[in-house]
Amino acid sequence: MTDLPPVAVEAYLNWCKNAVEHFLESLFEKEQGTAYGTLAESMRYSLLAGGKRIRPVLAMAALESLGADPLVYIPLLAPLELIHTYSLIHDDLPAMDDDSLRRGKPTNHVIYGDATAILAGDALLTYAFTLLSDPDYDKLVSFETRVKVIRELSIGAGINGMVGGQQMDIASEGKALDLPSLEFLHRHKTGALIRSSLRIGAFLGKASSQEFDRLDRYGQAVGIAFQIADDLLDVEGDAALLGKAAQKDQDRHKNTYPGLMGVEKAREMARMKLDEALEAIAFFGDRAGHLRALASYIIERRN
Amino acid sequence: MTDLPPVAVEAYLNWCKNAVEHFLESLFEKEQGTAYGTLAESMRYSLLAGGKRIRPVLAMAALESLGADPLVYIPLLAPLELIHTYSLIHDDLPAMDDDSLRRGKPTNHVIYGDATAILAGDALLTYAFTLLSDPDYDKLVSFETRVKVIRELSIGAGINGMVGGQQMDIASEGKALDLPSLEFLHRHKTGALIRSSLRIGAFLGKASSQEFDRLDRYGQAVGIAFQIADDLLDVEGDAALLGKAAQKDQDRHKNTYPGLMGVEKAREMARMKLDEALEAIAFFGDRAGHLRALASYIIERRN
């Protein structure tokens, strides 16, 4: 490590988040002066609107567990955040969830209009792959690993991952799902990109097949736990802390874990997923300290 | 060539188009039976709705000019068509150009709704990179070349290419542009992805730096010529042949070449671009027969 990460989870999260944001701030600066400068401005608006940066942070912790320096890989982890941001912009559109507030700020289309918001999402998604193929990182990572990371990201974000999950979410609004269907939905909508974050960290950190498998299992459990925690926050959360309206899911007849099984059972299930995640990475011993802390943080967070 | 391509340009176009469509038809078949099957169906609807497939065809002709077999590279050229298709779906949305007819058929959102149309575009764009990183082609193309192709496609399609051009197009509706601004707009909106098609063909065909430069210059000239021809068709075209309404640009106060300089001057300019394109590839001699025929076809086409 060029800089030693702090031990306490909130401090660790901030340390990682700052490093990621420092890199994100450098993006789309030169485009701001062009004839399509509004597009660059709108991309930066959403990209720098805050957020926990949990996907790159999880990948950084995975790299640490493999003894690699997470800081040098940030430009290749930022694409996870670009993809996450584009998905929020498109999700918030009037034609989708029609949200006007996100992280306490007006959503992209409220400020820039629907057309620019659609294009900003498209451009952020596309730029994820520009970064992953940037010759600046030719010496850092082999071409073979780059191709694997590109494949992983495109599958986690695509029809058999996140976008497929969003389609299921739209199609199942107002219909009561059973537990296996709800899990299937969330494994795609939220779980897939979180799982990919761990797998990308594993690829970049040159994980052995056993290490890869453990990080992958951790990612699957944490992906579901993250969504259950999100559902619980929507029921019990404080709108001021969330930076968006609470109880939206219920108003919109969305399928959620607490809606299906009640708050207590949902909380129990999140704890089960936490145990699964911790068990998967026990193998790494001390090197997985931050992965452990992040898993606990994810199910206990307040926003 | 495993199969000898025909000499006449229309027959050649059909031969290439059939080969590309045969591959496109194999995509998103297994996803049709899933909980997000509607998304797969909507992606296939637009992907298989016809079109000239001019981007992969140009790349195929570039491969031929380098003495390579274009047929084996089709899975790595299909991403050009996935990107083009996604851009049409998003362009046609009510929040963008609000078109209900394309190639004689209802547009994606008319059939599947705006939300699914947005996601279908996102998923097609994402899948372009899944294909380019598919291990099935590990033996066909080196990882280094794959990374170069991915970079080329993401730049041609992204903020400094196609999407940037679409933003300029939106921003300049109703404003009168001068010729340099109009050229700048079209070099991004239409030209960038056409140019990338040639450059991708050149990367895959292992072009020397001189060959690469010639194909790149051809791509730049043909990209602008294609847009001028498109503008001319909108003024003079037959709606039945076009499969969409004619004279839309004028109704919408879009900036076009004939609008700016009149039909005759625009036609003259297209011919100038054709000459530039032909001059760039003179160097290849007989091997560039199809590239030559395609350039002429592009400025003289009726739909």
Image: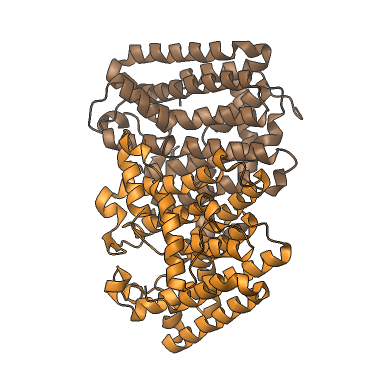
Chain colours: A brown, B orange
* Nearer-the-camera pick, B153 or A27: B153
Q: From this view, report whether residue A271 is shown above or below residue B207.
A: above
Q: Residue furthest left?
A: A175
Q: Position of residue A283 (x, y in %)?
A: 62, 11
From where the camera sits, is residue B216 visible? yes
Q: From this view, report whether residue B151 is shown above or below residue B234.
A: above
User: In which quadrant of the rendered view does residue B244 lie?
Assistant: bottom left
From where the camera sits, is residue B177 visible? no
Q: Position of residue B205 (x, y in %)?
A: 63, 57
Q: Quarter of the image containing the N terminus of chain A?
A: top right
Q: Position of residue A69 (x, y in %)?
A: 72, 29
User: In which quadrant of the rendered view does residue B229 lie?
Assistant: bottom left
Residue B118 as seen in the image, left or right of residue A146: left
Residue positioned 49% across, 58% down in the render: B163
* Nearer-the-camera pick, B165 or B233: B233
Q: How many marks?
A: 0
Residue B5 as seen in the image, left or right of residue B252: right
Residue positioned 51% across, 79% down in the render: B178
Residue positioned 65% across, 75% down in the render: B285
Q: Position of residue A97 (x, y in %)?
A: 33, 41
